[in-house]
Amino acid sequence: MLPGIIVRPLRRSADERGFFTEIMRSDWTDVFQDEVCQANMSISYPGMVRAWHKHEKGQVDRFLTIKGALKICAYDDATRELDEVVSAGENPQIVRVPGHYWHGFKVVGNEPAILVYFVNRLYDYSAPDEVRRPWNDSTIVPMLINGKKDDRCGKAWDWFLLPYK
């Protein structure tokens, strides 16, 4: 994984009433190394891609898929490495992505996805900390994907390419 990207599985406890999951603790210093000052929720429909953007003022995102499933990706221009993490509401985890990486996600599966994410910088409406490039930017050409050189490397990134083709 790219430096700073962390996936923390969350523990879901079940009893006859339902389920309980802790989603943020200040002693989880691996994913919450600095203050969280804003939490956001996003709902995306099946097949939607929300990408690419990055933050240049030090924002770090921590993603938690509440419902549905997402393929969360981060790309580093310098190393041309792309990391992808499939995150689903049935298997809760926090995915920490330093904002200096280009990042985004695609809804995988046939139901809307609900994403809650925690950030360490307040959103500034007058000067947003977001640099964008198109979701289908052909200049994103990974040489490594999750540390591997396979048949998806060396080509423009395709959010819709099936992983088994």
Image (spheres, rainbow, N blue to C red):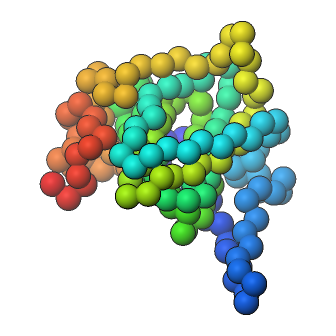
Residue 50 picture location, percent across and down: 45, 34
**At 40% from the left edge and 41% from the top edge, which residue is drawn?**
48
Q: Nearer the viewer, residue 48 or 129?
A: 48
Residue 21: percent from left, percent from top: 72, 69
Residue at 17% across, 47% down: 151
In this rendering, the answer to whether 156 lies above or below 28 is: above
Residue, far top? 126
Residue 140, position in %: x, y?
32, 27
Looking at this view, is 75 or 160 the one in front?
160
Residue 124: horizontal and vertical position, in percent? Answer: 74, 18
Visible residue check, residue 34: no
- Whether residue 111 is visible here, answered yes or no, is yes
For the C terminus, which image quadrant? bottom left
Asked which quadrant contains residue 28, the reply is: bottom right
- Which residue is at a point 72% across and 16% down the rendered structure image? 125
Name the residue at 23% across, 46% down.
Answer: 161
* Residue extending furthest toward the bottom: 16
Q: Is 165 positioned to the left or the right of 4 in the image?
A: left
Q: Is residue 7 left or right of residue 52?
A: right
Q: Is residue 117 above or below residue 130?
A: below
Task: State how many labels appear.
Answer: 0
